[in-house]
Image (cartoon, rainbow, N blue to C red):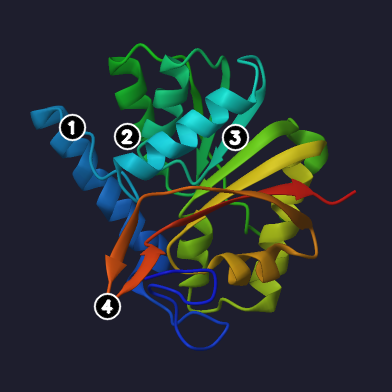
């Protein structure tokens, strides 16, 4: 159970143990399978962290912003989060994923829902990172589990984290906000990871559970503001 000082799934050390979830091959195969299931049965696949967490993010975004803001979903997977935002009236939505299979799946689902969303392949950790001159700047950046997956990479450490932070910061406008949903890091831990580039603005309430007399959250959702 993840409270501010204890984590549900993270290891004892700062660096997460590597996992198959940190490999591109796993996600490529996952989304190929999900695309086949969608075509055969209309099944959109897994909603990462569950529908209630996704609904909390959608509600916060809807309450906070005008519908014309630019939103980027980093590691969009099946793209369902942006589809939910499109159904709420948001107009400028972009989803990126390093897995081309995910982008194909997201586009297929969005087309079936008649949602106008731009999905494309992009790896924020690629050599050279993100060239800010070649990319649009966004008002809001969403990360629902992507940093978790990155933290499970075999070579995860301070250098990989720095590439991630530098790339995400370059994609945001100067007053941009960065929302991160994580099950691998506590609120305090994710704040420590982000502190060189971002400052915590608020924590979005998520469904909690009680275990062993303690109340806690499986998933933490934290909103950061880009440091000036």
| Disc 4, SS | loop
| Distance of label 4 from label 2 (alpha carbons) | 40 Å
Looking at the image, is mark 3 or mark 2 earlier in the sequence? Answer: 3
- Examine the rendered structure and indicate whether residue 27 appears above or below residue 103: below
Mark toward the viewer: 4 or 2? 4
| Distance of label 3 from label 1 (alpha carbons) | 24 Å
User: Which residue corresponds to mark 1?
Assistant: 38
Residue 110 location (% of width, % of height): 36, 21
User: Which residue corresponds to mark 3?
Assistant: 72
Indicate the quadrant containing the N terminus: top left, top right, bottom left or bottom right: bottom left
| Quadrant hosting residue 163 | bottom right
Mark toward the viewer: 3 or 1? 3
Task: In this rendered view, identify the residue nearer to me: 36 or 84.
Answer: 84
> Is the C-beta separation of discs 1 and 2 under 8 Å?
yes
User: Which residue corresponds to mark 2?
Assistant: 105
Residue 14 location (% of width, % of height): 58, 83
Residue 93 location (% of width, % of height): 56, 24
Mark toward the viewer: 3 or 2? 3
Looking at the image, is mark 3 or mark 1 earlier in the sequence? Answer: 1
| Distance of label 3 from label 4 (alpha carbons) | 39 Å
């Amino acid at each position: 159970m993840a409270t501010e000082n204890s984590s549900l799934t993270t290891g004892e050390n700062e660096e997460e143990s590597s996992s198959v979830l940190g490999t591109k091959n796993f996600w490529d195969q996952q989304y190929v399978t999900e695309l086949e299931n969608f075509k055969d049965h209309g099944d959109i696949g897994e909603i990462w962290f569950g529908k209630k967490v996704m609904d909390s993010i959608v509600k916060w975004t809807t309450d906070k912003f005008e519908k014309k803001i630019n939103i980027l979903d980093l590691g969009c997977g099946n793209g369902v989060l942006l589809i939910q935002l499109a159904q709420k009236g948001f107009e400028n939505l972009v989803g990126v994923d390093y897995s081309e299979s995910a982008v194909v799946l997201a586009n297929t689902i969005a087309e079936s829902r008649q949602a106008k969303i731009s999905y494309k392949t992009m790896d924020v950790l690629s050599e050279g990172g993100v060239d800010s001159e070649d990319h649009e700047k966004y008002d809001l950046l969403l990360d629902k589990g992507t940093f978790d997956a990155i933290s499970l990479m075999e070579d995860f450490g301070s250098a990989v984290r720095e590439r991630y932070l530098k790339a995400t910061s370059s994609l945001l406008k100067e007053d941009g906000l960065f929302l991160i949903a994580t099950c691998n890091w506590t609120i305090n831990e994710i704040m420590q990871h982000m502190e060189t580039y971002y400052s915590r603005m608020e924590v979005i309430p998520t469904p909690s559970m009680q275990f062993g007399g303690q109340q806690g959250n499986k998933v933490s959702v934290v909103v950061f503001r880009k440091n000036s």
